[in-house]
Image (cartoon, helix red, strand yellow):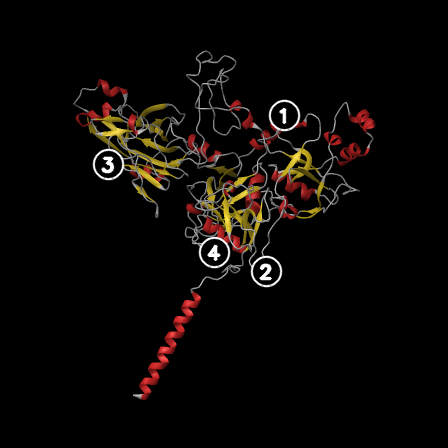
Amino acid sequence: MGSCSTWAWQELLVLLSSLWLWVGSAQPTPPGPTHASGPQLKFRLAGYPRKHNEGRVEVFYNDEWGTICDDDFTLANAHVLCRHLGFVAATGWAHSAKYGKGVGRIWLDNVNCAGGEKSIGDCKHRGWGNSDCSHEEDAGVICKDERIPGFKDSNVIETEQSHVEEVRLRPVVSGARRQLPVTEGIVEVRYKDGWAQICDEGWDSQNSRVVCGMMGFPAEKKVNRNFYKQAKSQPKQKRREDIGSKKRLFSERQQLNYRLHSVSCTGTEVHLSMCTFEFYRGNASAACGAGMPAVVSCVPGPLFATGNAHKKKQRQQQQGQPRIRLKGGAKVGEGRVEVLKNSEWGTICDDRWNLLSASVVCRELGFGSAKEALTGARMGQGTGPIHMNEVQCLGTEKSLWSCPFKNITQEDCKHTEDAAIRCNIPYMGYENLETWYWDASNVTEMVLSGVKCAGHEMSLSHCQHHSASLNCKNTGTRFAAGVICSETASDLLLHAPLVQETAYIEDRPLHMLYCAAEENCLSSSARLANWPYGHRRLLRFSSQIHNNGRADFRPKAGRHSWVWHECHRHYHSMDIFTHYDILTPNGTKVAEGHKASFCLEDTECEEDVAKRYECANFGEQGITVGCWDLYRHDIDCQWIDITDVKPGNYILQVVINPNFEVAESDFTNNAMKCNCKYDGHRIWVHSCHIGDALSEEANKRFEQYPGQLNNQIS
């Protein structure tokens, strides 16, 4: 009994000790410094204008500085980040790049902290580097101006004195101010409420290359430094005599305010802030005694060149088809990167995709350095082969094909990993040329009519349009055009192999085609047939239409204007959704069909993508990103009436959204073509491909196809 009693007392003491420890640990304690778990993280505040305890949050992860997207951002997130930066708490946060847009990676998106986490990495988020944001959505924080006791500032808190944000090229020659783009001028950096210059002592071509890249130009050229130096050093009267009649420098009226010196770039940086440099401290009025303001001259890409140089470079480009292109972007200089290999266009896997490789692509295409290297099919998924993986450019290469890369295998990557880019492009001032509104009550005159754009033009004035005679000059505002702009759009593609696999001929009795005739799905000669006797010969095939874009495909018309068809008992949300044509090799149309959008819906979707649209019960119509709509070969109007077509060799063409009623990020891939041979009884369909999937040379071979001499398809 004694030993039992001793054991019981020991158990009670242990229990009481545990309770005391638990109660003690539950008491509130002053906030302590937080340390990042996992890979070493660093944090800093950047941007302008701001105080020392606020700014854009930048994170150093995987040896690269990046930002945080403001999607789902909360005050709890700001609390965790402010503790990282050595402050006791946050008092607020900022969205939409209030402190300016960052550069490089966007490391975190959809961050969701409870507020008590020791590291931002412990909060819920989409994963490091997985983001669907642009730098226009960079998040910022406002921290309480009270430091955590004992906090050792191993993290870097950037201030105005040690960070370069905005850079510009200021033209100094008379007349250059009005000419865009500005290709030559004094390099200036934003400082407080104005601009400051950089001393050119030690300035070299690598520095100029970085600045030109930021300004949207692919290359730099040598500057006549003596001209600027002469203008600076000569007396004002002498300058007027020597150069006044030819060129006049605005800099003679500008008081210089030097901010940076000893700038040293390698030439591969995407922003001047990534180079090494030093700041002038205190009164810098007497700085740069032996030098002058840094001046840079840039070479514009073909798209932005003017005059004879523009025409010459265009001729040089037309000598051979480029082996790289951008697809799916909403703006000039952005898109999914596609490369041409073995006469077929394909994409690049995003493994190891970074700003160095992205900048090589941007410059190769005639733009500046890269603003962003995008991963995870941010500009939509491509089709066909994936040609390159683990591209590792140094940043000095003239072409992406000069960079080391790995050939792809089927197991390595999927199109959900397609790489994309956003490039720096020159400022052209086009947004100042036309302003439009849906409310046209303030319109006093019409300036354009008959506008027809291909989609790649930089301005409406570059599109085809009527000359001086306007068609609607005296119609008032009734016919004023309007637009709604969006950063994202759908992108429809037809699954070409399925057309080839499912094509066949059916002789269908006329008594089974009354509904199809009502919907104009038969050729015009059907009206003269001896109804209900006889038949029509139909080329049938299945259509599987994928939305590989970044926004759902929705019909232009709202539900209130959908048309009910009693015969088929369904609503049409689009009168014509696809065109089906049989063409001769020279392009003459010999048979045609069309398909109204009987019902746009998500038949199937990729893994982890939920269906959103279905036709049942007057449901919403559309095609979700990552889903496809399947029109089976055995439904009405999924055919071309070839009753009147003679035997021969033809091209089968299918065009989706042919009237451009719904916006898409890319219309060049809306057409699909196949070679086909018809012997009067059977048809052979082969070589089906999306319209822009092949090289120009391969497309010419396809269009000049002489026809099958037998039924063997090689």
Where the C terminus falls, by quadrant?
top left
Determine if residue 266 is in view. no
Sequence order check: which comes first, mark 2 or mark 3? 2
Q: Which residue occupies the foreground of this view, 189 or 274?
A: 189
Sequence order check: which comes first, mark 4 or mark 2? 4
Sequence order check: which comes first, mark 3 or mark 1? 1
Instruction: Determine the CA span between mark 4 and mark 3.
Output: 44 Å
Determine if residue 292 is in view. yes
Q: Is residue 99 above or below residue 76?
A: above
Instruction: Determine the CA span between mark 2 and mark 3.
Output: 63 Å
Q: Which residue occupies the foreground of this view, 301 or 92?
A: 92
Q: Identify the residue position indicated by label 2 in the image.
A: 152
Which amino acid, mark 2?
Lys
Q: Identify the residue position indicated by label 4 in the image.
A: 121
Instruction: Determine the CA span between mark 4 and mark 2.
Output: 20 Å
Which amino acid, mark 4?
Gly
Instruction: Determine the CA span between mark 3 and mark 1.
Output: 58 Å
Q: Which residue occupies the foreground of this view, 328 or 275?
A: 275
Q: x, y percentage for residue 652?
A: 35, 30
Element carrying mark 1: helix
Instruction: Determine the CA span between mark 4 and mark 1.
Output: 53 Å
On residue 307, which mark appears?
Answer: 1
Mark 2 or mark 3, which is nearer to you? 2
Sequence order check: which comes first, mark 2 or mark 1? 2
Element carrying mark 3: loop
Q: x, y percentage for residue 245?
A: 77, 22
* Image quadrant in which you'd find residue 472: top left
Q: Identify the residue position indicated by label 3 in the image.
A: 616
Instruction: Determine the CA span between mark 2 and mark 1.
Output: 59 Å
Which amino acid, mark 1?
Gly
- Crowdedness of circle 3 by 10 Å Cα count: few (<14), some, many (20+)? few
Sequence order check: which comes first, mark 4 or mark 1? 4
